Image (spheres, rainbow, N blue to C red):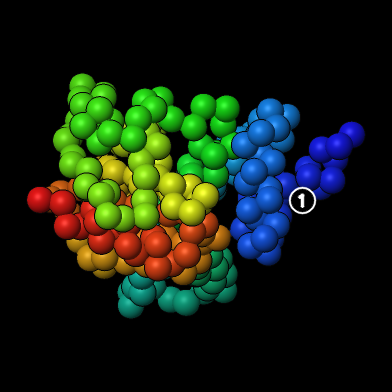
Amino acid sequence: MVCESWKAKLDTYLDGELPSAETRAFDVHVHNCPSCSADALTRVQTKRAIQVAGRRFTPSAEFRRKIQQRVAPNPRRSLSPGWMFAAAAALVLIVGAVTSNYVGTRSGSGQVFSEIADLHVATLASSSLVDVISTDRHTVKPWFQGKIPFAFDLPELQNSEFSLLGGRMTYLDQTPGAHLIYDVRKHHISVFVFQDRSLRLPTGLNGNSFTPKDVSFNMETFSKDGLRYFVVGDASAADIASLAKLFKGVS
């Protein structure tokens, strides 16, 4: 089949490991091939399900506290071989729990950024790019009223190279948000908007602007008026920063 050569590279494409020229060609193909777009969407959803499942088994603080209490030194008891063996076994559990928690925290620190990238790819691979199709911000913004628990403003694009394609509903950590699609020189850029306090963001991010490094797309995130914005796409880092700047300047 004609699509077999494309599907052979699908995982590489979803992982952002293709050269930029092949990535652009793949974008065009996926948008126009129902079979490949459905396959891409299925793989992205499977990837996200695995990531969510992996976070369910991080040892809790209560578990660590109980283990620590069991191995706390007790000067009134003699260090019998049996007690020493039990302490050693418990220590192994503690080391494993702490290590697992540390690794989970490290990997989880960038989890939200990976999920944002997955949402971007899944949308591009879907048969319906947006739910409300309009280049007019005064049409797109009201469409979200009553669908999400917050309001936001869209920037004026006059005298810029960006064009608004429309918007759709989205979810992150079971939190509803807005997903806006912009175009610049045939590149699609996603802008996600969520309530800042509803997301599990990396410690220390707070309201600061931040550019993640461990994702396969250029991305910038920032907080403004209690809302968290994610700007992501395969456009240049300069274009991503320019669109983010337009949103930051909305009053």
Instruction: Tell me where residue 53 appears, x and y as whole percent.
Output: 53, 42
Could you tell me if residue 68 is visible in this image? no
What residue sits right under mark 1 in the picture?
9
Quarter of the view holding residue 193: top left
| Outermost residue to the front | 159
- Relative to 196, is 241 on the left or the right? right
Q: Position of residue 62 (x, y in %)?
A: 34, 52
Name the kind of residue labelled 1 in the image.
Lys
Residue drawn 62% across and 36% down?
Answer: 31
Q: Residue at x 39, y 27 (%)?
A: 133
Element under disc 1: loop
Q: Find residue 107 and report its horizontal and vertical position in percent.
A: 48, 61
Residue in the image at 36% along x and 74% along y: 73
Q: Residues within 10 Å of mark 1 (few under 14, many from 20)?
A: some
- Position of 195 with respect to 239 (left or right) is left
- Residue drawn at (23%, 53%), measured in percent from left and top? 247
